[in-house]
């Protein structure tokens, strides 16, 4: 009609303005629809992580405000962190080992760490150190570190008290035995073993820390040695005996060590726990 001059320019301009206004209203309604859909999506609250929820703080029918009303709390349970503080001397000890090349720095390598809860004997739970702070706290003289543990069974809860044990030296091979098999000779520690002729032999040993109630022997013994675990006061080096073979430790403790080894293997295939699981000599009665 405009091309044929059937309507005036004024009417044409009015019609064009009305069209633009109608298109603007369409876009406004579409935007309002998108906002309504978005707001409807906010009515379904989805947890950003998988875990265990606490009690509901808001009951059905109450009004809530975005960013203000706390509905509940949730904690992740597949992995848990254990924070601990090491004193300055311990930090300097590990720093020296790293400089000597006998133990890599915890900043570069995930070192094994063992945890014990209040109800545990020893430190049966294995994890890794995955964080070390960058400064010493001048108020306490300690440095903060963090270990991570798998929690597939859900037995660890946030807030539990835990004891942490770290490897304090470079890797070495050792034997695990019971403390009752260790004797004291002046300032020396020794173990009595049997040779192929069942004669008692004296072995000076170097002791390490305890692991799951067993004593680590750093040197002086081999895995094939038959160790006297009972009756040390009644036998002497060079005497011949008639041994009764028994297990060095209980089946339960052995299973705990094997479980610890399995957890270590998952993170450190080259790490081996050495324990005395073979039959050893006992003199009882």
Image (spheres, rainbow, N blue to C red):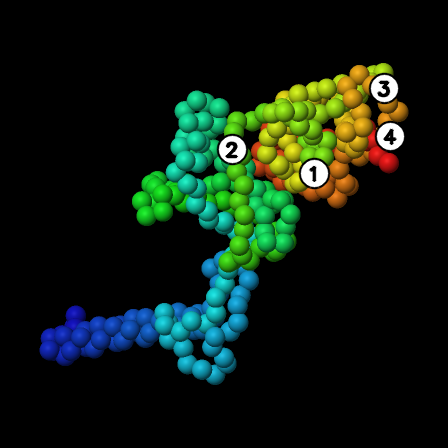
Question: In terms of sequence position, does the residue under pointer 1 or pointer 2 come before the other?
Answer: 2
Can residue 105 be seen? no
Residue that label 2 marks: 168
Q: Quadrant of residue 184?
A: top right
- Residue 175 position, x and y percent, is 67, 28
- In this rendering, the answer to whether 184 lies above or below 70 is above
Other-residue count near label 4 (Cα within 10 Å), few / some / many at <14 / 14–19 / ≥20: few
In terms of depth relative to the viewer, which is nearer, 68 or 20?
Answer: 68
Q: Which mark is residue 240?
A: 3
- In this rendering, the answer to whether 77 lies above or below 163 is below
Residue that label 4 marks: 244
Q: Quadrant of residue 256?
A: top right
In terms of depth relative to the viewer, which is nearer, 85 or 24?
Answer: 85
Residue that label 1 marks: 258
Q: Which mark is residue 103?
A: none
Other-residue count near label 2 (Cα within 10 Å), few / some / many at <14 / 14–19 / ≥20: few
Q: Is residue 23 left or right of residue 68?
A: left
Check disc 3 and report its element: helix, strand or loop: loop
Q: Quadrant of residue 2?
A: bottom left
> Which residue sits at x=55%, y=62%?
52
Check disc 4 and report its element: helix, strand or loop: strand
């Amino acid at each position: 009609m405009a091309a044929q001059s059937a309507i005036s320019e004024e009417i044409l301009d009015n019609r064009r303005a009305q069209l633009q206004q109608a298109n603007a209203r369409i876009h406004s309604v579409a935007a309002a629809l998108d906002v309504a859909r978005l707001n409807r999506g906010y009515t379904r609250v989805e947890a950003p992580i998988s875990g265990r929820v606490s009690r509901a703080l808001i009951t059905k029918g109450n009004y809530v405000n975005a960013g203000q009303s706390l509905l509940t709390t949730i904690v992740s349970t597949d992995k848990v962190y254990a924070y601990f503080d090491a004193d300055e001397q311990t930090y300097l000890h590990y720093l020296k080992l790293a400089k000597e090349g006998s133990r890599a720095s915890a900043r570069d390598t995930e070192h094994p760490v063992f945890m014990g809860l209040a109800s545990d004997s020893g430190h049966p739970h294995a994890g890794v150190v995955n964080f070390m702070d960058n400064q010493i706290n001048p108020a306490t003289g300690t440095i903060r570190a963090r270990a991570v543990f798998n929690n597939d069974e859900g037995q660890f809860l946030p807030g539990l008290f835990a004891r942490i044990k770290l490897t304090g030296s470079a890797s070495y091979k050792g034997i695990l035995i019971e403390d009752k098999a260790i004797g004291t000779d002046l300032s020396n520690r020794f173990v009595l073993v049997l040779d192929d002729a069942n004669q008692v032999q004296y072995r000076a040993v170097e002791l390490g820390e305890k692991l799951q109630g067993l004593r680590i022997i750093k040197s002086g013994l081999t895995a094939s040695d038959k160790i006297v675990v009972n009756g040390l006061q009644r036998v002497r080096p060079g005497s011949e005996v008639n041994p009764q073979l028994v297990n060095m430790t209980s089946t339960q403790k052995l299973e705990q060590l094997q479980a610890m080894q399995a957890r270590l293997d998952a993170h450190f295939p080259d790490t081996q726990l050495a324990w005395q699981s073979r039959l050893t000599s006992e003199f009882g009665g």
